[in-house]
Amino acid sequence: MSEVEHPSADITAREAVREAEQRGATAHVLDGSDLISKRTTLEGIAAVLNFPEWTGRNLDALYDCLTDLSWLDEGEHVLIWSGFQALAEHDPKAFSRINAVLRDAAEHPICGRTFTSVLTRD
């Protein structure tokens, strides 16, 4: 198996939640330890961020939702993805694409809500 670069913060999910809350952000924790496919990971992200039921489960829909978040309270929303290594190891291509969408969405917020993501070591 090829080695995949893991762009993670060197903190635990608990520490990431504490940091987000200290700056007034809302933390949304995704336990990715069992998410080994693109489909299950997209469903997991949709669940923790409470995406509308009608939202598609593909990369375009993920980007659209992450740049909008109008159904959530105003302010910053932080996706804390612990256990991202499961997807990175089982499907490196899906991991790379989802991670790219997370980064891109963070750069283009609308509706008075900002989005950031943190990939943690646990």
Image (cartoon, grey):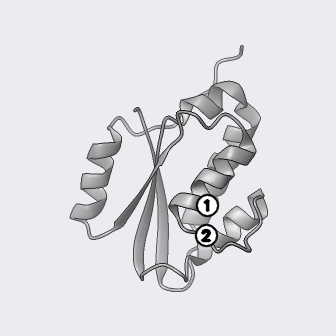
Per the image, the residue denoted by label 1 is 46
Question: Is 56 drawn above or below residue 102 in the view shown?
Answer: below
Which residue is at 73% across, 71% downward? 55
Q: Position of residue 62 (x, y in %)?
A: 69, 63
Q: Position of residue 98 (x, y in %)?
A: 67, 48
Q: Residue at x 57, y 81 (%)?
A: 110
Q: Residue furthest top?
A: 1
Which corner quadrant of the image does residue 61 belong to?
A: bottom right
Residue 83: tell me if it is visible: yes
- The secondary structure type at the circle numbered 2 is loop
Please identify the quarter of the rendering in which residue 58 is found. Answer: bottom right
Check the image and report above or below for 122 versus 48. Answer: above
Q: Is residue 87 above or below residue 79?
A: above
In the displayed structure, does residue 27 sit left or right of residue 31? left
Furthest residue in direction left, as rendered: 22
How much space separates mark 2 and mark 1, taking CA atoms?
Answer: 5 Å
> Residue 111, image x and y in percent?
54, 86
Amino acid at dot 1: Ala
Vertical order, 41 against 110 (above or below)? above
- The 10 Å Cα crowd at callout 2, few under 14, some 14 to 19, many 20 or more, is many
Q: Quadrant of residue 88?
A: top right
The answer to whether residue 24 is left or right of residue 46 is left
Q: Secondary structure at mark 1?
A: helix
Q: In the depicted view, which residue is nearer to us: 19 or 57?
A: 57
Which residue is tagged 2?
Answer: 51
> Which tag, 2 or 1, sits closer to the chain's start?
1
Q: Position of residue 35 (x, y in %)?
A: 62, 38
Q: Which mark is residue 110?
A: none
Is the Cβ of the residue at disc 2 closer than 8 Å to that at disc 1? yes
Residue located at (40% from left, 71% from top): 76
